[in-house]
Amino acid sequence: MYLDELWSKTSELLDCEVEVHGWIRNHRPQKEFGFIDFSDGTSVKHLQIVYDSTLKDFEKLTSLHNGASIQVKGILKKSEGKGQDVELKASEITLIGDCPESYPLQPKRHSLEFLRSIGYLRPRANLFQAVFRVRSMAALAIHEYFGSHGFVYFHAPLITASDCEGAGEMFQVTTLPIDKIKGEVNYKNDFFGKKTSLTVSGQLQAETFATAFSKVYTFGPTFRAENSNTKTHASEFWMIEPEMAFCDLEQDMDIMESMLKYVVSYVLEHAKEEMEFLDKFQEPGLIEKLNKLVSSSFTRITHEEVITILKKADVKWEFAPEYGCDIAKEHEKYITEYFGGPVFITNWPKDIKAFYMKQNPDGKTVAAVDLEVPGAGELMGGSQREEDYDKLMARMVELNMNTEELDWYLNLRKFGTVPHSGFGMGFERLLIYITGVENIRDVIPYPRTPGSCDF
Amino acid sequence: MYLDELWSKTSELLDCEVEVHGWIRNHRPQKEFGFIDFSDGTSVKHLQIVYDSTLKDFEKLTSLHNGASIQVKGILKKSEGKGQDVELKASEITLIGDCPESYPLQPKRHSLEFLRSIGYLRPRANLFQAVFRVRSMAALAIHEYFGSHGFVYFHAPLITASDCEGAGEMFQVTTLPIDKIKGEVNYKNDFFGKKTSLTVSGQLQAETFATAFSKVYTFGPTFRAENSNTKTHASEFWMIEPEMAFCDLEQDMDIMESMLKYVVSYVLEHAKEEMEFLDKFQEPGLIEKLNKLVSSSFTRITHEEVITILKKADVKWEFAPEYGCDIAKEHEKYITEYFGGPVFITNWPKDIKAFYMKQNPDGKTVAAVDLEVPGAGELMGGSQREEDYDKLMARMVELNMNTEELDWYLNLRKFGTVPHSGFGMGFERLLIYITGVENIRDVIPYPRTPGSCDF
């Protein structure tokens, strides 16, 4: 029996014989008896196993190693000890797979850096048992939210011949023998007959599906070949990109807010023990922070108003706030504190935003929005998309973009164009916020960052 | 209002004013009135809109084009016409975005080849409205199945430095300026400081998570740079790879069978209209085929027994069945017909299977399984994994593999090794089976195949 089953019917199983299999997380043998902190990883809650010298192989059992896998038969009993309600009084313990004393993951505090170096073992550590279970739960929550709101889940292509953001920081994908190329590359000979890269966003393709199904979302990997070694950048990460037809910026924000609250509530409810663990050991006050988010109403304010507030503030800024310019981390922090909760900042200067965003009548701003969250900074970004063919074309020409390559994207504005909006949320950024873990490397099973592609 | 909402409360809304927005799928203007076949894509069921000459801009309305987007106000009425229960009697129709008469997607039968060439518009066609909605529903079903059975959803890395299958048919991922390389490549200068590729399977990493959480699954993209132009091969596709600790081959098959039945039942129940459409226009008998699968019990038989049956069969084979060899498509077909349902074939000759499969005591076979399904051939493949360090190491050395590169994988057998099993299912192969669509290019939003990477 797996532990998740056992915990779901403890009272039923009390004083009954059960059989479990799992790993020794910590073993404390004594003279006449022994305690095993036992888990099979199906629950953050461990099971205490008690055995005593009446077992025929008692001597051998006392020398069982941490990390070894065992099978245990016994009676589930009310526990008299502190720290657990029930324990398993073993009648038979069988070693399945031994573990040497040199096992790197001992029951003590290891540094996160060290745990990254044993990435294939760290999911067995308590912190990562909680983090990756929360990751799984949050992913489920996202699918349930969109599924129950009539969204079609759309798998955007990963290999692409176009560059959505025009950022240029893409990984090239090729089957050419690159050590044999001399000078100019003939991409006719490459696998797809053209130059291809890994996608940085599925948005443009999601727009084609939004104009077919009205409500769609992507949830898949995206890639950035950006040489940034920070706590919040990874070269491979998962993104959620919803896209809605017949939806303006206000309605876009409604969905952003409702989705975020749903996912956070869902995790708080369905990963209670994981969140309690993280609240206790990772970020004291974590649950309170998240509960506050769920019950708060999000402020909506324009970029211009934000700059006015920042300019009036009695703060010595490292970067002076300016109309028409981006805002810095210190400004984001100030604004969320100023309003005491999450803030949607809308109508950004067009020159610092992407080409596809809807141009506002003022000629200076676009219908873009960033969501700033206390203690997390920017958590999502979205916009209404430019649905006017001529305006979009003009903007692309202005930015010197290849309009021919994106003719299909432009054509969406020719064939029954509609107002539509969408947003993007980096899944790992959300997880950093929900788990209280600080480094993106610690919320991704196998992180890929500049110079690092292990396991 | 979106149509999914309207259809969910039709009786409530009867004789009430509603406002909808969407696209004209087909327009049939008459002298005194007009009919619009209308959809916003949130449901395969369209809404019929009726307008007449009492509307002030009647003349203009009669010239509305197919494909145009409109907003319609009107009263929802019981319909007297054939083919629908209700219709919308319009009081106001507003054009949102026009569509030229050259619109490629006219309301007539287009070939699948032509529709692929307008891949950004084909999701608006009836067939693809059904197919991609079923795709979304099946993905949800997979997450629900594993979520409700205590599995942790694990995101396997996409960029990898190792080659799971040893197949060698991988896409290289690089940021090196490949037109400037002269001779030998110094991978120290590449983004990750080593040679990297796109993964062909997340299984090896999933095993590390299975030995931490016991029950895990992946659901993500995988890549094969195989130069096969067939109806069932794509270069980029989605795979589901569950992996379970304390699970032998029999239990593995239990999960394969239960998952498949769950997903098929879920789609039949939650995508009823889509499946009826596909049954009617794509594969007559589709629903019956799927219902039969759900109610059948799957046969379990060894590879050796299969060969014996094939040898005894009164059939002139194109490929003679042989003990110790793989079986051909014609054999798969015969076997599923012979048993009148899905067949698990187990204990395959080790030389035609992967290195990580558990070696059986006979020294000749491995604890592998393929699931053969009537009308679909091989739908899933799985195995118990070799958990014995020495046996696994010996096999890898025998196959001339780089054991150093996979030391972390081998180490799982050192640190509390456990019997464990898993399987893989190509998501698109499942969709071909469920939708009755024949070509993998038609169940992927934007297919990537040799020489083809459009949109």
Image (spheres, coloured by chain):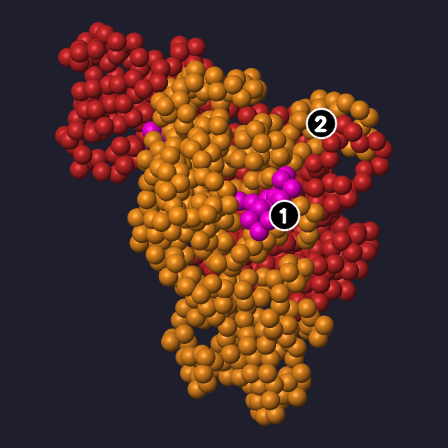
Chain colours: A orange, B red
Amino acid under label 2? Answer: Asp
Count of numbered marks: 2
Q: Chain of mark 1?
A: A
The foreground one among A88 and B310 is: A88
Q: Amino acid at mark 1?
A: Asn
Above or below, B60 against B375 in this view is: above
Q: Quadrant for residue A78, please give it.
A: bottom left
Residue at which label 2 appears: A190
Residue A278's spot in the image, x, y percent? 47, 64
Residue drawn at 49 percent across, 23 percent down = A409
Q: Is residue B105 above or below residue B327?
A: above
| Residue A455 position within the rendered picture, expressed as x and y whole percent measured from the top left | 68, 53
State the extent of the magenta-drawn residues as a range. A225-247
Q: Quadrant of the C terminus of chain B?
A: top right
Is B391 left, or right, of B241 in this rendering? Answer: right
Q: Which mark is residue A229?
A: 1
Q: Residue at x 46, y 23 (%)?
A: B121
- Real-space Cα distance between discs 2 and 1? 31 Å
**A317 vs A235, nearest the viewer:** A317
Q: Is residue B67 visible?
A: yes
Question: Please, is residue A265 above or below residue B85 in the view?
Answer: below
Please say whether residue A423 is one of the residues in the magenta stretch: no
Query: What residue do we see at 62% from left, 78% from top?
Result: A94
Q: Residue drawn 67% across and 26% down?
A: A195
Is the residue B435 above or below the residue A335 in the image?
A: above
Q: Chain of mark 2?
A: A
State the quadrant of the N terminus of chain B. Answer: top left
